Image: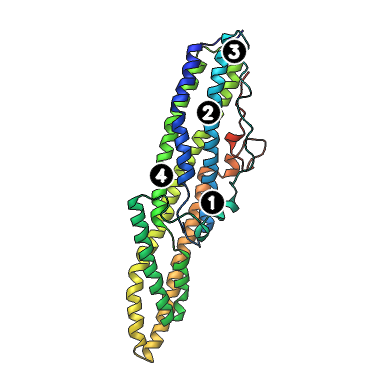
Amino acid sequence: MAKIDRSKVKGAASLLEKHKPELAKAAKSLREDYRLEWPGMGLFLSPLEALYNQTAEYDAENLEAGVDAVAAIIKGLNKTVANYDNAEDINATNLQGKPSGKTETGYLHGLGNAGFFNTNSPTGNATGWETAGTIIDYSAMAVAEMTALLCTVLSPPFIPALLAASGLLCNVPSMFSTANDLSDIQAQIDHFTDQFDAATKLATDDWDDDSVTAFTDVTTKVKSELGDISASLAGLGSYLQTVGGALLAFWLAFIPFIVPFLATLTAEQAAPPEGQAAAQAEGAAAGITWSTVAETVIMGLAGIAVAYISLNGSLDTRDDIGGQGGDDTPDLKQIKIEWH
């Protein structure tokens, strides 16, 4: 007959029950807060934002499934004690409902919510200072865009710079604030994981039965997935800060340039014909310069995205449970919570 320390198993269930709301809160926060507010990373960086969306959506669904998995483990621990009290074999099965099938973790789904396709309100979930930052951000960029348009009217060869700035119109405050949100959520997950580890160790102390091997296997998988989510959120936060920092640097350089440049073109246009020719030449040179700067920013950030995937692992390598890696179904939805 199986041997367990019923008080320790009950204590483990109680410990998990006490801290499960922390995990549920983290899952709710991730679901509500991971999306960047319009226009996100901007039109030209939509492919990079799509990668971010795909990964964060996977983590959100995986974490939500983790809350269900923990609830099933609590149920199983209580069932283990009940079976032991009734002198029955430990048979903790049928602990979960039917898993949901459809998920929205693919890259195309992420692309459909990136850049100017992003339907998330610019200030929908923002705090007061974030809203103020977004308004200032938009106002400065809007002035720069209108000024660049006037420069293009005066000197049509300047149009590559106008297109470059338009493609990099973005929401920098949202990137920074979302990175902070992800860091807070990561801390909540890490704290819960510590309690989860303590609970599983408590439960298995003096548990002498073959079923303990299956229980340990289940909880090890759940703990591993929670660790993967935490590491992923850390990487995503750094990713957002890097992208936001690069775009902020672009705009901090472009905005001080564009207003004096308009004044220069205006003065030159007023002094034909030499001034007009100079305006066209300067517009062409500036157009090439700023389009090159934009291209450098984009290619540099694309390289960072590749490095991020190499460092943290693509979803195809993380999504490895269920018989087929990269099936876009979060792993915690596919771990069967049972032991017998």
Going by the numbered disc 4, the residue's amino acid type is Asp
Going by the numbered disc 1, the residue's amino acid type is Leu
Residue 62: quarter of image: top right
Q: Is 304 located above or below residue 223 in the figure?
A: below
User: In the image, is 36 to the left or to the right of 103?
Assistant: left
Q: Is 286 located above or below residue 25 in the figure?
A: below
Which quarter of the rendered picture does the C terminus lie within?
top right
Tag on residue 51?
A: 1
Identify the mark nearer the N-term, 4 or 3: 3
* Helix, strand or loop at mark 1: helix
Residue 292 image point, x, y percent: 46, 68
Q: Which residue is mark 2?
A: 70
Q: How many marks on residues?
A: 4
Residue 132: quarter of image: bottom left
Residue 253 image point, x, y percent: 36, 65
* Helix, strand or loop at mark 4: helix
- Residue shown at 41% from the left, 59% from the top: 247
The answer to whether marks 4 and 2 mark residues whose Cβ atoms lie closer than 8 Å is no
Of badges 3 and 1, nearer the viewer stands 3
